[in-house]
Image (cartoon, rainbow, N blue to C red):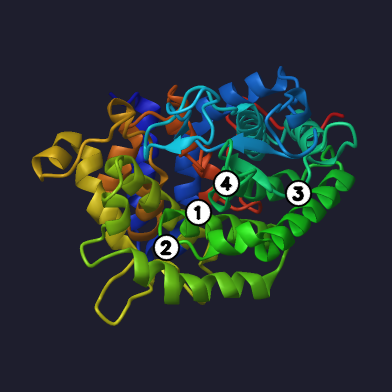
Amino acid sequence: MFVPRVWLAVFLLLFAFCAPGGYAQEHSKLVAALAKIERARILRLADQALQLTPPAITDHVATNSAGGPHDFFSQSDYSWPNPTNQTGRPYVGHDGESNPDVFSEHRLAMRNMKDAVAALAAAYALTGEDKYARKAGEFIRVFFLDDQTRMNPHLRYAQAVLGSSTGTSYGIIDTLHLAELAVAVPFLEKSPAFDPAVDTGLKQWFTDYISWMMTATNGVKEMNSANNHSIAYFLQLASFAKFTHQEPLLQMCRARFENVLFPRQMTNDGSFPLELKRTKPYGYSIFQADNLSALCVLLSTTNEDLWRFKLSDGRTPKAAVDFIYPYLADKNKWLADGRGRDVMHWDNWPVRQPCLLFAYAEFGGEKYFNLWQKLDADPADLEVRRNMAVTQPLLWIASPADKFPQPGRPPSHTK
């Protein structure tokens, strides 16, 4: 049940879409309302991040990696020891069934770093307190830049299959969470406590990573994947290109979205047939709707709104949200409609899916916002969290130029 101040925030959100001129003229009201709703959560997570020691992949030795201590390593989630021989190798695949014994420490270090930086950036945006920006810079410096702890800008050894592959193309999805890092950092750049050398160094890291993504064999293969992996790839590429100010690359991402990703993957009812064929069709359908929506947010401009893009047969990106919405509202309907139950993690979906909020920001329709508000923003299930590229939606809705009300907590620029 909403507390009174949240009712006020809801009123402001609804007013934003009812007022003359619609969302384009009421953006600041929507941002202010969202800031009210998210404020306590953001500050709680940011204050926790202030107490953390910044993680690095060098904290964890990957004994099965073909690379060195600065090379990211992970194992294919759905690969299991081969029961036909004593060594268990080569591992064999079981789609949708995550092996709890695979090496995941580098993946967790990256995700924890990103979650911390995103929370700190959101807290700085809300309060103007430089302590948040300073700590975020520390996380970034340790993970990406310091000689002793930095991660090399490639995923050559991601999602290895022991006994058959030292790294796979689909491992590139392991940096999906960095898409939000690139969204968060521009908010930190306003702070005098955010070291410009960290900012410059991070931009160079992403420039180098983009180059690897687009030229390495595994990167090119992932780019051309027929299912969710290519959408996740371009969500990353678009975010990194935007952060590093590579407009030609952003335009390539828009063209790819319009001519390849969207028309080839989403069918007329808003579903994604290749995801429905998986052993976790519910989770993968949610994942696709979220990432497609986030891609629309990143790639849209004042002159080109990808949410409004329409194919000749009438398909629009909004259909992806409208397809999944009733199943987010009532998961039992998914089964009642004859769709398959996920083999794992069924009980822990849905959570606070960003596609609901992004659709509300674009089209209005309070049903999206009301459902988003009811769902869990911080699930405990690590597999669910792995599929949540967006953990601080305020950073995606607002812009670094926005000003936020700071009730009872005046900004501090002390160093």
- Residue type at numbered disc 3: Pro
Q: Which residue is mark 4?
A: 171
- The location of residue 400, given as percent across then percent down, is 65, 51
Image quarter hosting the C terminus: top right
Classify residue 313 by image quadrant.
bottom left
- The location of residue 306, given as percent across then percent down, is 44, 69
CA gap, disc 2 to disc 1? 11 Å
Q: Nearer the viewer, mark 2 or mark 1?
A: 2
Q: Which mark is residue 232?
A: 1
Image quarter hosting the N terminus: top left
Mark 4 secondary-structure assignment: helix
Instruction: Give the total number of marks visible in the rendering.
Output: 4
Q: Which residue is mark 3?
A: 153
Q: Nearer the viewer, mark 3 or mark 4?
A: 4
Contact between marks 4 and 2 (CB within 8 A): the answer is no
In this rendering, position of residue 357 left or right of residue 125: left
Contact between marks 3 and 2 (CB within 8 A): the answer is no
For this rendering, which residue is in front, 280 or 112? Answer: 280
- Establish if 119 lies above or below 181: above
Q: Which residue is mark 2?
A: 226
- Establish if 8 lies above or below 4: below
Q: Residues within 10 Å of mark 2 (few under 14, many from 20)?
A: some
Residue 365 appears in view: no
CA gap, disc 3 to disc 2? 25 Å
> Which residue lies at the image location 31% right of the left edge and 40% below the top edge?
280
Q: Earlier in the sequence, mark 1 or mark 3?
A: 3
- Residue type at numbered disc 4: Gly
